[in-house]
Image (tube, rainbow, N blue to C red):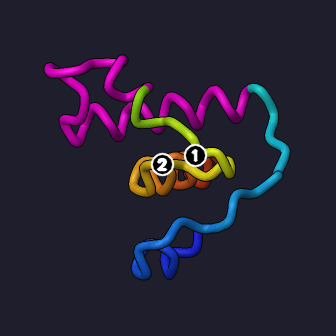
Amino acid sequence: MDTAYRAQGTPPPRSEEQITLGRAFDAFAAFLDKQWQENRYRVQDGIAGLRSDMSLDPQGNPTDDALWFDWLEAIDRTR
């Protein structure tokens, strides 16, 4: 992932990249691991809080840029 986007505080454009189901599953596990390690969503809201932060706006853009960056990094880690 291009870290310049994170430095600018803007999300990178959404990619239409195709990934396998296995890679998507690995990326999701890596994403959840990071959220757990950073102590996000452990006690207060749990999975419901995480899911509500994973919303898209009417234009299809993520509403939580940090979570989007975490997701892209998880995909990169599984390459």
Which image quarter: residue 66? bottom left
Amino acid, disc 2: Thr
Name the disc covering residue 57, or none: 1
Q: Is residue 20 magenta?
A: no
User: Residue 42, percent across and down?
Assistant: 20, 23
Which image quarter: residue 56? top right
Name the disc covering residue 63, or none: 2
Label 2 sits on a secondary structure element that is loop
Label 1 sits on a secondary structure element that is loop
Label 1 – label 2 distance at C-alpha: 6 Å
Residue at x-position 45% and y-position 50%: 70
Residue at x-position 68% and y-position 33%: 24
Pick the front one: 7 or 30:
7
Identify whether 47 is placed above or below 10. Answer: above
Residue at x-position 52% and y-position 54%: 73
Identify whether 32 is placed above or below 73. Answer: above
Pick the front one: 17 or 64:
64
User: Residue 53, percent across and down?
Assistant: 40, 36
| Magenta part of the chain | 22-51
Specify few, some or many for label 2: CA neighbours under 10 Å numbering under 14, 14-19, or 20 or more: some
Quadrant in which the N terminus is drawn = bottom right
